[in-house]
Image: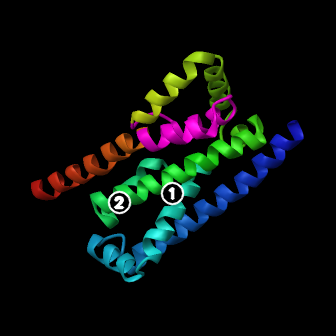
């Protein structure tokens, strides 16, 4: 078990570092070309890619759920800023929903070693304590998925360690996740519009 955990930890560490390095390269490139200093240029560049733009963004959101590279709020903000509140909401929802199911299945297949590989020991211990809630975990999980501030990516992995059926998990994600994503998507859009108007 310890060997499996260490191996997974190393694999996900390498993937996380590679993702972080790629993010830094893209940020430097975006800054150099002016895309990160001009929202109009960024949106125009992405829209010129046609269907590839949304497809790549959804894929990045899926990966972001399973292997956290940046805070989830940043990718949610990017979706809203680039694609607008409605399309941004749809792409965020699709990517996060698929990523959540993958995280659940990986935890179910790999066990606690998977959760340990993507979190610190302190976070892992906290997550394991949630499992002690037994019959209280499911109501707690539903509430957490509804709220925009809960660590729901980790909770999806914890859910994979319980006896919750995939069908029930998927239904909870599909029905509850839109509320927190909408809160981010439309809340951020309204805030940025207000800032732009104030300035």
- Give the main secondary structure, helix, strand or loop, of the magenta stretch: helix
Mark 2, Cα crowd under 10 Å, few <14 / some 14-19 / many 20+, is many
- Does the magenta-highlighted stretch encompass residue 103? no
Residue 173 place in picture, x, y as percent: 49, 41
What's the CA distance linking mark 1 and mark 2?
A: 11 Å
- Say what secondary structure mark 1 lies in: helix
Q: In this image, 194 relative to 31: left or right?
A: left
- Say what secondary structure mark 2 lies in: helix
Nearest the viewer among 146 and 60 is: 146
Mark 1, Cα crowd under 10 Å, few <14 / some 14-19 / many 20+, is many
Circle 1 is placed at which residue position? 61
Res. 129 visible in picture: yes
Q: In this image, 193 relative to 41: left or right?
A: left
Looking at the image, which residue sits at the far bottom?
A: 48
User: Residues in magenta?
Assistant: 148-175
Q: Residue at x 66, y 36 (%)?
A: 160
Quarter of the image with the C terminus in it: bottom left
Q: Residue at x 31, y 79 (%)?
A: 44
- Whichever of labels 1 and 2 marks the residue nearer the N terminus, that label is 1
Circle 2 is placed at which residue position? 88
User: In the displayed structure, would residue 199 be above or below residue 152?
Assistant: below
Residue 162 place in picture, x, y as percent: 67, 29
User: In the displayed structure, would residue 91 be above or below residue 148?
Assistant: below
Q: In this image, 90 relative to 7: left or right?
A: left
Quarter of the image with the N terminus in it: top right
Res. 133 visible in picture: no
Looking at the image, which residue sits at the far front?
A: 167
Total numbered labels:
2
Q: Residue at x 50, y 23 (%)?
A: 140
- Does the magenta-highlighted stretch encompass residue 165? yes
What is the number of the mark on residue 4?
A: none
């Amino acid at each position: 078990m310890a060997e499996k955990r260490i191996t997974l930890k190393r694999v996900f560490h390498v993937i996380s570092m590679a993702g972080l390095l790629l993010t830094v390269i893209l940020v430097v490139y975006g800054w150099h070309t002016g895309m990160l200093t001009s929202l109009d240029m960024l949106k125009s560049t992405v829209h010129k890619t046609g269907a590839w733009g949304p497809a790549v963004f959804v894929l990045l959101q899926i990966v972001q759920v399973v292997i956290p590279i940046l805070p989830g709020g940043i990718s949610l903000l990017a979706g809203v800023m680039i694609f607008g509140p409605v399309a941004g909401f749809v792409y965020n929802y699709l990517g996060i929903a698929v990523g959540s199911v993958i995280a659940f299945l990986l935890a179910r297949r790999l066990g606690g070693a998977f959760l340990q590989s993507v979190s610190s020991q302190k976070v892992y211990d906290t997550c394991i304590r949630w499992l002690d809630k037994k019959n209280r975990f499911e109501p707690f999980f539903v509430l957490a998925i509804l709220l925009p501030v809960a660590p729901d990516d980790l909770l999806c992995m914890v859910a994979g360690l319980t006896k919750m059926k995939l069908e029930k998990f998927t239904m909870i994600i599909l029905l509850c996740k839109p509320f927190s994503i909408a809160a981010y998507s439309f809340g951020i859009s309204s805030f940025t519009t207000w800032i732009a108007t104030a300035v």
